[in-house]
Image (cartoon, grey):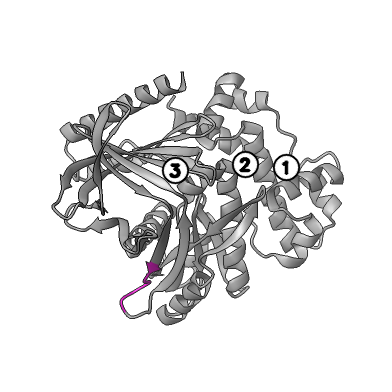
Amino acid sequence: MDSYNILNVAIQYVEDHIKETILPEEIAEACNYSVSNLKYLFHKVFQYGMMEYVNRRKISEAACRLIKTQESVCSVAFYYGFGSQEVFTRAFYKIWQETPGIYRKKRHFYGLYPKQEFSCDECGVFRRRFDLSGLTEELNARDCSTVVCFDIVGIRFIKTCYGKDAGEAAALHALRRIEELLETDCSLYRLAGDKFAVNLGGAGYPAARNAALEVLKANGTSFIFKGNEILLSMFAGVTPINAREITSKQLFDKLNLTIEEAHKRLFRNFTSPYGFPAFGLFYDDASGLYKGEVSHAHRETRKGSHGFSCKIPCEEINYFFSIDDETEPVRWNTTEKEYHLFFPDGEDWYRKTVFDSCKEVMREHYYIIRNLRYHKDQSLTYTLLHLEITLTADGRVMTLNGGELKEALYEGIISKKEYRKIINTGKSILNRLEKKRE
């Protein structure tokens, strides 16, 4: 049985027994799979354990019951199989950062961890989707609804810098921001790890656009996670839903496309202390890829390697996002720490090394590229080819954007030959990093 089928069976077992005490052996037996292998599969996909998944689903459903009923916290705790109110409260606070009693008074959103399903798409990409059956039912009950989709800017950066738990904290704070700035009678759903949808019902496009802009005004503000101040920003897209018989899959695809189209309207300008744009990435409609540009690069030799280099002591990143052509863009700024770029001769990749305030290396990013060109004005231009490999200060190595790379192959943006070359280049970088760690 394929991995995604095993996960789907396991997840359905959890849903069918969510009000009971669930043991790992019972889930494994339902999948006809060993406990150890199932735990490994869950951790590989979710980055947390199988019983943690069970607990998050129970707490999400318990949050719903707290909001929609007048039952006591103790009754809700026992209803979902918790041994005591104290155990339930600790588990609840771990996820919501609020006690059940405070949560019930302040909140109306509860679907932080909805049921998930898995599939392998036509591109060969392993896909995870959150359950949208509730939203689908709402939309099918009306002739026309308007949905606003939100996506967190730079969620991978947050996870890379501060860990996977910081990504979940960012999602919680994003949802709280949406919840607090929109009307209480709208419905809020989590589409994926960093993507959200708000059903505004019969509100027309202008009203939905204004609601989205109200949320985006908070871009550039921060939240605190384990003593770190993390900036949180989002972009958004608005779409009408006209069909009365839309399926959950059709809905997910439509909302995902809305987010993808909105992402193309997110722009960044990078300005160094020298007063000129030092670095830039621009989406190219013709190729379907991002083009990079680096100003004031110079020749350098590093550890026996010759190439082009650019050192940026610190950098202000100016973001602007336009929800449509008729609306003034939302603008906000962030500051990047000191980093160095190095483009080695004869290689199809470059390295970005980020330093902390004490000049210690925080992390290294390796980006695979093509068409590197050096120009007379000392600038470099290139095309970015999705795959990114990151080495953190604590030795973690992460390979990012593999799904996007497969999609680029499927859509004809890159050839099979180039796809194989990118994969081989990634393996070469990984081997280099393994030797460096040794």
Q: Is residue 195 left or right of residue 177?
A: left
Classify 327 as above or below 196. below
Relative depth, front residue between 401 and 307:
307
Distance between the alpha carbons at the discs numbered 2 and 1? 9 Å
Mark number, residue 19: 1
Looking at the picture, tell me which residue is in the foreground, 254 or 377: 377
Q: In this rendering, is residue 30 above or below 14?
A: above
On the image, the x and y values in percent for residue 332 come to 46, 68
Mark 3: give few (<14), some (14-19) or many (20+) Cα within 10 Å: many
Marks 1 and 3, Cα distance to the nearest angstrom?
47 Å
Question: Please, which residue is most extreme toward the left here?
Answer: 376
Identify the mark at residue 354; answer none if there is no mark.
3
Q: Which numbered dot is residue 15? A: 2
Amino acid beneath label 3: Val
Which label's residue is closer to the chain start, 1 or 3? Answer: 1
Give the secondary structure at mark 3: strand
Residue 152 in sight from this viewpoint:
no
Q: Which tag is nearer the camera, tag 1 or tag 3?
A: 3
* Image height of 433 relative to 348, above or below: above
Q: Residue at x 50, y 31 (%)?
A: 396
| Segment tinted magenta in the rendering | 320-325
Among the 4 quarters of the image, the one containing residue 12: top right
Position of residue 426 measured from the top left corner of the image (x, y, whole percent):
31, 30
